[in-house]
Amino acid sequence: MALNIDLNADLGESFGQWVLGDDEAMLDIVTSANVACGFHAGDPLTLQRTVAQAAERGVVIGAQVAYRDLAGFGRRFLDATPQELSADVLYQIGALEALCRVAGTRVAYVKPHGALYNTAVHHEGHARAVVAAVQAYDPDLPILGLPGSRLLDVAAAAGLRTVREAFADRGYTPEATLVSRREPGALLHDPEEVADRMLRMVQEDVICSVEGTDVEVRAESICTHGDSPDAVAMARAVRAVLEGAGVTIRSFA
């Protein structure tokens, strides 16, 4: 059984008067924060506050880079050229880094968001674009992604550190990819069920797919989406169950 694992959440996704998620509550639970960079969510003041609150709690900060799709919350594919996408990713990391520096912390890793995350599982050009941006900015930054994805394969080949991630609140296909949000079973809502499946993942390296078959998932970090209505309850349940089983919760970065 793994002796330790990271808990991460997507945070900083509110925009102006529209509040999304309970970032302060989540920051008391997780060890890593995937902070939006303004392209899919998050206005500058929201991001500044989120970064400062994370720094105060000692939570490690990652840049959650996305397609330039604010209206679609970054959940729509954007047919950008690799050069355009790489520049966009670099821009987002730099913007969040400025806010981190002011708060006395730094960007410690990079994780794609939404459609970019899922596209980079199979899309060679967009996977390489993300990796190229990270490598150009700081080759010591780890990339957080789905096990077996092209993103992690390309990053490893480029000499970057890769971190495998599992999703507490998402359904899995028999191929160990995430069920589309347009399909039944994509989202899970029961904190107890979510916590139990994450404990099994840590202990046995498997998750039950939507078809009832076990799929191998080896992960160093567990994500609970911060915009889910049950996010705080699920994150608390996952942490409690894992710690109760003797697993140490700490950041990978």
Image: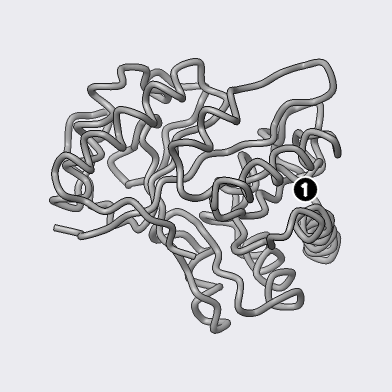
Q: Position of residue 31 (x, y in %)?
A: 46, 49
Q: Residue at x 14, y 50 (%)?
A: 203
- Neighbours of disc 1 within 10 Å: few (<14), some (14-19), many (20+): few
Looking at this view, name the residue that lies furthest to the front: 56
Please tell me which residue lies in front, 172 or 3.
3
Query: Is 159 situated above or below 176?
Result: below
Q: Is residue 102 above or below residue 29?
A: below
In the image: residue 206, left or right of residue 173: left
Residue 101 % position (x, y): 78, 61
Taking the image as shown, residue 20 lies to the left or right of residue 87, namely left
Q: Classify residue 15 as left or right of residue 187.
A: right
Q: How is the image coloured?
A: one colour
Q: Nearer the viewer, residue 209 or 1?
A: 1
Residue on which disc 1 sits: 79
Instruction: Count the marks.
Output: 1
Mark 1 element type: loop
Kind of residue indicated by mark 1? Asp
Q: Name which residue lies at 70% across and 42% down.
A: 36
Report the residue at 39% width, 40% height from top.
Answer: 167
Pinpoint residue 154: horizontal percent, then vertical percent. Answer: 54, 73
Q: Is residue 101 above or below residue 74?
A: below
Spot occupied by residue 188 in the image (x, y as percentages of width and height): 36, 22
Q: Quadrant of the N terminus?
A: bottom left
**Residue 84: quarter of image:** bottom right
Taking 124 as reference, is 10 above or below it?
above
